[in-house]
Image: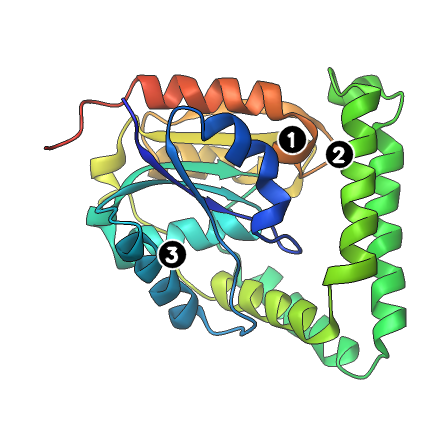
Amino acid sequence: MSRTLLLLPGLLGDAGSLWQQVEDLGRDHQVIAVDYLDTPGLQPQLDALARTLDERGARRAVLIGQTLGGYLAQAFARAWPDRVEALVLVHSGLPDPSLGKRIRRDLRVARLLPWPAIRWYLHNALSKMIAGLEGSGDVGDVDAAQEKIVAEHFRQRFAERLTKPMVLARYGLMANLHDSPPLTSAEVSHLQGRVLILGSEGNVFARQLPRMREIFSGAAVHSMGRRHNISLLIKPVESHRLIRELLAGLPPQDP
């Protein structure tokens, strides 16, 4: 059965970041990948997502969010619970006010830095992550071809797409998301058995899994390896298989 899938990219991503999901999952479903507004405001982002669904004639959607996108998916589920059919949270934990506070502190410094310095720092951090994947048994079946695709994707983004206002807005949005209280089990009771959580061993979010299992009762939880937070990019085959299993288990849609 064809469903609407709303893809929410990660912290530094955009709709183009999830081209593999659009191409593969789009063979069976209506797949919508979004770009975020360049604002740290949470409500404008949520309103934009609702408008996107309206424009595509979708009453409900399965929200698939990686890192920042997963937090945004949770916020959308609180704002419009009747529009969320299922959740896929990829390397996304629960809101953490202490983490939001640290992000705001770092933002105060980042605003004073020139864009080349910020770009160098972020590119260096992501390059180390990619280098850690190459030849590492920790992340399992990430083949060399997929590593090259991801590395080239990051090179292109840093060379052509990212800007200082965009990056500051994304980190500001993440800080605002961490100021939101976590969803309660009552708020997502209608999503019991309709949540898929993909994470990494040793990741900071792994410590939140016991609490997430309590909130998202019946959630399917899968480890995607270690020391990374980009499973939709580096493991599309495995992540798509798990997403399809979730979709196959959903009850028939209302007419």
Classify residue 153 as left or right of residue 100: right
Q: Which mark is residue 75?
A: 3
Mark 3 secondary-structure assignment: helix
Q: As rendered, which of 223 and 36 lies closer to the eye?
A: 36
Q: Disc 3 or 1, which lies upstream in sequence?
A: 3
Q: Is residue 98 above or below residue 157?
A: below
Q: Disc 2 or 1, which lies upstream in sequence?
A: 1
Q: Is residue 177 above or below residue 209?
A: below
Per the model, the C-alpha gap separating discs 2 and 1 is 7 Å
The 10 Å Cα crowd at callout 3, few under 14, some 14 to 19, many 20 or more, is many
Query: What residue does disc 2 label?
Result: 227
Classify residue 215 as left or right of residue 7: left
The 10 Å Cα crowd at callout 1, few under 14, some 14 to 19, many 20 or more, is many
Give the total number of marks visible in the rendering: 3
Per the model, the C-alpha gap separating discs 3 and 2 is 26 Å
Q: Which mark is residue 200?
A: 1
Q: Quadrant of residue 115?
A: bottom right
Q: Disc 3 or 2, which lies upstream in sequence?
A: 3
Q: Position of residue 182 (x, y in %)?
A: 39, 53
Mark 2 secondary-structure assignment: loop
Tell me, yes or no, whether the two marked residues, 2 and 1, touch with CB atoms within 8 Å: yes
Q: Name the amino acid, label 3.
A: Ala
Residue at 64% of width from left, 32% of height from top?
A: 231
Q: Position of residue 133 (x, y in %)?
A: 83, 29
Q: As rendered, which of 75 and 64 lies closer to the eye?
A: 64
